[in-house]
Each structure stands twice: as C-alpha cells, then as structure tokens.
Amino acid sequence: MNCDEIQTRLSEYVEKSLDAISAKGIELHLLSCSRCRVEAESLDECMQQVAGLPMVDPPLGFVQRVMAHVREIDKTPTLWERLFFPLRVKIPLQATAVVLVGALAIVLFQKEEPFNRQESSEHGVATIASPTPSEKKNEPSKGSPIVVERSARDQKTSDSTVTPTAELAKQFAEQNQFNKAAAATPPPAKAQAAPPATVQLADESRQEDKKEAPRRPAIPAQEVSTSGEVQRSRGDAFGLGAAVEALRQPSLRPGPFLVERSLSPLSEPSADVEFVVRRRLRERREQKDAASFDAVQNAEAKRTTPAPAAPKTSSLTEIRWFTVPIDRFEQFKKELAAEATIESERTLGVMENDFAQKTGRELLIKVNIISP
Amino acid sequence: MREPSNTSESMVSDSISDADCVRRIQHGEADAFEVLVRRHEKTIFNLVYRMLGDYDDAIEVSQEVFLSAYRAIGQFRGDANFSTWLYRIALNHATTRRRSNNSRQHRTAPIEDMELIRDSQPGPAETLEKKEMQERVQLALNKLSPEDATVILLRDLQDVPYDEVARLLEIPVGTVKSRLHRARQALKSLLATYFYAGRKAI
C-alpha cells in the first residue's frame, strides 16, 4: 500500500473500525512513514477534540416550555371546533339563524304564491265563448282546464225549472261524484233514506241554479290568479256567477299584464281596479232553488240532502283576480254586481288605465269577496 | 446513540418505551409527549447546539424540533426508531437555520467571545486551554459544510453507529464512510495549526 491508499483508510484506522489485517498493514506503514503518521495523529486529535466537546445542558424549564406550546397546539381549534364550539354560545346562535332563515323562507314563499299559481294555472285561464246550445258541465279534474259552456237552453232550464232530460240527469250524476268527493261525505243515514238518483238530481239542480249562464256575448277575460281547486269550488258555491264561472275557458294568449306584473316577484300584482264585494246570503238563493226544483222533483229528497260542494260560510276574505279588456270592463262590473253586492270600488293606476285603453290592453281586476 | 447521562431523568422515562409514548400521544394523551421531550432533550439540544454554535439559537431551534415532532406524530408509523425520526427532524431544522444564518452573515463565536469566556471564568491554565480548544473546534465545525458537520457530529460526538447514520441521512453506509473521511480531513486542516502550536508549546 502506498501513502495515498493508506491516507484514504486512515480515518477508519483511527476510529478502529478496520479489520485486523488492514489495521496491521497500516500500523506497519505508519512506523516507516512519518508523513502518514502525522496525518493519522492529526485525525485522531480531531476526533478526540470533537468527542471531547462537553455536553451542554438545555436551559432550565425547557421541557415545560415545550409542553406549554404543545398544549397551545392542542387548544388551537380546528375549523370544525371554530364552527361549533363553545356549544353554549354557538348552538343557540345557529339555531336562531336557522329559525330566522326558515321564517324568511315562509314569508318569501307566501309573497310569491300568487305568481306561482298564476304560472301553474296558465292553462286554466278561461274566457267565455259565445253561448252554444251544447250543454256541458265543467270537469273538475285537477290541473286541467275547466270549461264551462252555458247555453241559453241551460239557463232557461234552470230558471224555469223544467224537468231535466235523461241526458241532463246523467250529467248530474257525474257531477255528483265530484261533489261527493269535494265535500264531506253526506250523512249516510240520509243518503240511504232517499233514492240515490233523486238525491243526485236534487244536488245538481241546485248546483245548476247557482251557476247562471251569461245572457249576452261572452267577455274574454282571464283569471290571473286562481285560488286552486278548493277556492274554485267555493267560488261555485257562492256563485260569483256567470262573470266568474264563465271566465273559465282557455285562452292561449296570456295577457300582457301577466308578464309585466311578474317582474316584481316579491310583491303581489297591483290591480287597476279593486272591488270589495259581499256575497249574497245563500239561504235566499237556496230557498228559491228548492222551490223551483220542488215543482218538478221530489221535494222530500231535496230537503234531506245536505248542501253539497258548497263549503261552510266563513268570514275569510277571498281574493280573485281577473283581466278584462278595457272596453268590456263595464259589462264585467254589471255582471259582478248581479252576482254580489259591490261594497266598494277603487280604481288604481290611472295612468296605466289610460295607457291600457290606448293600447287595447287588459285591466287587472282584483275582487275581494267577503262573507255576507 | 448516546443516552442521556442523567440517571434520574432516565428513571422517570425508562418505564415506558418511545413507541408506547408515541402510541399514547397518537391516542390523544398529550402528556406522554413530556416523557419523550425529557428523554431526548439533551441529545437533541446538543446536536443542534453543535450544528449552530449558538446557545440561544439552539434553544429556539430545539423547541421547534420538538413542536414539529408533536405536530407530525400522527404520521409516525414506527418504521424507524423514534430517536432516528427525531434526529432527522432536528438535522433538518438545524441545517435550515445554519444556512439562513450563513446567508445573513450571522457569524458565531468570534475569538473575542472566547476571551470573554476566559476573562469571566478564571480557572486553572489547563482548563482554560481546554476551553479555548473547544471553542476553536466549534468554530471549525461552523466553517464546515452542514453535511460534513452533520456526519462528524453524528459519528464523533453522538457516537451513532454507521448503519444508523446511513438510515438517518438516507444514504449508503459506504457514502457515510467516504463523507466522514472527507469531513475529518476538512476539520483537521482547519485545526492543524493549533495542534502543531499545541505540540510545540508542549
């Protein structure tokens, strides 16, 4: 081994990690080579010096300081903890927020309700067609357009209380099925007492009488905001009548108001004209109906039959919306007056009214129906 | 590896192994970490201190080492010894600090400091000379590259076996040996004049 080879292994030799044979060879070389011997001594000295460096003590309280920081790390809340802790503060806070959001949602929903219905009942918008001789009852299937076509004959039939034809009786029977479904089930005892066919006829006769057909050319009108099936049948019951009932023929063209009024979804549409009408007392009408019907039908059966689809009188104010062409407004008003007592009439949005007249647009009419 | 020489501390922590402590900490028992800190504070602190040559820096960095270990203890799977894992964290922190100190020309322990020590701590001439030499060795270590200083400190100061050093530094044992040889040569050349001066004086 020459000096270069020796020197590369000196480090291991000095720390005595070489095998015995290699160590002996280097030892022999060092005896003869002073340069390598000095090198070995220097390396040894180096290692001794490093190994002799004293161990220093960490400062007092080092462990406590570290552990204090460790506990701080543990205390640092996670995102989850920041959201939900402390429970006694955050749970009531978050519960309050949930309640407020829920209340706001309900308020918004109620505000927007007329519009939702307006959209959903777009296809249920009705106009009056010219009176046709055909006699057809409205089909009360949910969501489908309700078509009411009255004929002069129908009207005549109801008014003059002519005995219903066999065909009419059949239709009455159909209508009665709906009445039974819509209204509470009639007292079974009474229903059994009277022959079913007779009962149905009696019911229908009254229903028919309540629905007066128009006697003049129909008003193309749109019911902007329907009140759903229940309210519709209620409307039937207190008979806002021809002007109301007959408005239920489908119109393919939604009035311009529909679009414009929808622009502010959080407020209900502002009517051009607002009516407050009071329902007529139904007893009077019913008595009249009964009397006329008795003339041709079994009076006993009629009396034992409970009032069908008509819901009980409530003090609730009903609001119904109509769109009527400006030139037909007076006609609409007359018919409304014929059906109910107009308590008050308020014309709003004069500018819009004028504008509508010029452009041939339709008036939005709000009818508040109050109980007798 | 050199175990803490303080026997009272050893008695406190000997009852539980490092692995047990780690398991307890991983199950949320933070106090078990105190056992590990007590057990390893001296070796870690000395390694860091010799890597940096500054006592205050050593306190700061050692604390960071333990806190880093605590934060990362969930990731410790027990593949290596806890001490090896802790050494690696310590060397990473110390090397980073050493590099940033060097780049900021934050030099340590000039000769004047040694004279201050000598003045403030009078003692027998032999002790003084020894102290002076220790300061020179520290200065020389500071001048080495961090890699060279690391292998010298691990092998010659901490007496860590070759294979452990190899695992720690994630290099082969042969590389550890050649790197150690090169580092000792570098340190020797830095200290040679003092050795000769010392011999001449003797």
Image: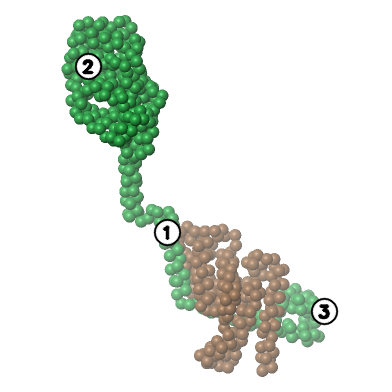
List x then y, in percent, for residue A296.
22, 5
Dot 1, how many residues are within 10 Å of its Cα: few (below 14), some (14-19), or many (20+)? Answer: few
Q: Chain of mark 2?
A: A
The residue that disc 1 covers is: A77
Check if mark 1 and mark 3 are on a common chain: yes
Q: Chain B's colour?
A: brown
- Whether tag 1 and tag 2 are in contact, CB under 8 A, the answer is no
Q: In which quarter of the view is residue A359 placed? A: top left
**First in sequence: mark 1 or mark 2?**
1
How many labels sit on residues?
Answer: 3
Q: Chain A's colour?
A: green
Residue plotted at (58% across, 78% down): B105
Secondary structure type for disc 2: loop
Q: CA distance from mark 1 to mark 2?
A: 70 Å
Secondary structure type for disc 3: loop
Q: Quadrant of the N terminus of chain A?
A: bottom right
Of labels 2 and 3, the one closer to you: 2
List x then y, in percent, for residue A11.
72, 77
**First in sequence: mark 1 or mark 3?**
3
Secondary structure type for disc 1: loop
Q: Is residue B107 above or below residue A182?
A: below
- Whether tag 1 and tag 3 are in contact, CB under 8 A, the answer is no
Q: Amino acid at mark 1?
A: Pro
